[in-house]
Image (tube, rainbow, N blue to C red):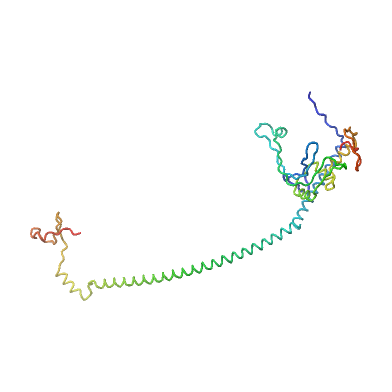
Amino acid sequence: MASAIPTFTKIGKVIRLNKHGCTNRPFYHIVVQKVKRKCYISHMKISITLKKKYYTRDNFDGPVIEQVGSYDAMPNSQHEKLVAVNFERVQYWLAQGAGMSNPVAQLLGLSGFLPNHPQTLIQSWKNRREPPRERKLQPIKGIAPPLDNPKI
Amino acid sequence: MFRIAPKKFIPADEKAEVKRLYDNYFHQMKSLRHYFFEQSLEQAESGEVAQMKHRLEEEEHIRLMEENRLENEKTAKLREEKLKIQAEKTRENILASLINKEEETRQYEIQIEAFLEKQKATPFIQAENIEKAIEEALANPVDFNFAIDLDGYVYRGRETAIEKIPEEERERLRSN
């Protein structure tokens, strides 16, 4: 793909969500982490495509370099999902050439730091299209308007 | 039994829309990353951290240069002292060698004189002494012939006969 601007080479670092918290209570740290390649079980005499699909060891990713924010997936009493982001550091790591996972890209797009991720737009029109699904829990009435979006 | 997952059907226009969105997004992201990169370069040149680093480096440099200068002075002093000592030593060496040389020449001259005197003392035959010497030589012929016995007795002279010499004079053993 010919372009005037040269492409970035991958430095082994990625900005992604690391899941912390406990059972039924997810909490994500937005984190800059070192990425190791997947290692395949080499002694098996199978084609590499099959190996890539079925016979890889655990992907022991490298250590966390820096925490750059947090994302609370459970809405609080005001029906808000709180997100904290250190934009300066995110800018630094993007300048260095770090990758980003999709959820992080979406969050940053929603925050206004980056352009809106297409996934948010796609999800939004899909949500509008489909009928709301049945819910077990009653919607809690508070400061924020009640949830009528079935997908959240 | 063999469940085949149903393939999702996405209409063509939606696909096109999705592609358009993603293309735009990646384009924007690429440009943003480059922008961030250039910003970081500018920061590195002129940011606060860079200035502080620069200042610290300068200070460090000055300090090290100062240290270096002091060290140089120290070593210069030491070197000068060493050189002085060495100069003294060499001077003494040279003097000693000169003295030795003089001694040797003196000895040599003495030896030469002794040798010359020895040579002069030996009786050379000069032009005046020729006739005298000839007469003397003719008058005293020297006979170098000799014979040796198995027992080691020497009989000198060409014309001497063995029986004519008495036993006492006969005994002349080898003298080492």
Q: Is residue B7 left or right of residue B164?
A: right
Q: Is residue B59 above or below residue B40?
A: below
Residue at the (55%, 67%) spot, across then down:
B77
Query: Of residues A81 and A9, which is closer to you in this image?
Result: A81
Tell me residue B174's x, y (percent).
17, 58
Q: Is residue B30 above or below residue A152?
A: below
Query: Of residues A76 and A103, which is closer to you in this image?
Result: A76
Tell me residue B117's x, y (percent).
27, 73
Using the rendered view, name the quadrant where residue B98 is placed: bottom left
Q: State the quadrant of the C terminus of chain B.
A: bottom left
Count of marks, rendered view: 0
Q: State the quadrant of the N terminus of chain B.
A: top right
Residue at the (36%, 71%) spot, across then down:
B103
Q: Is there any visible trace of residue A80 in the rendered image?
A: yes
Tell me residue B100's x, y (percent).
39, 70
Q: Is residue A73 above or below residue B113?
A: above
Query: Of residues A139 and B126, which is closer to you in this image?
Result: A139
Q: Is there any visible trace of residue A4 in the rendered image?
A: no
Q: Is residue B150 left or right of residue B53?
A: left
Using the rendered view, name the quadrant where residue A74 is placed: top right
Using the rendered view, name the quadrant where residue A129 is placed: top right
| Residue furthest out toward the top | B1
Residue at the (65%, 33%) spot, across then down:
A43
Q: Is residue B165 left or right of residue B5?
A: left
Q: Is residue A134 above or below residue A35?
A: above
Tell me residue A19's x, y (percent).
77, 40
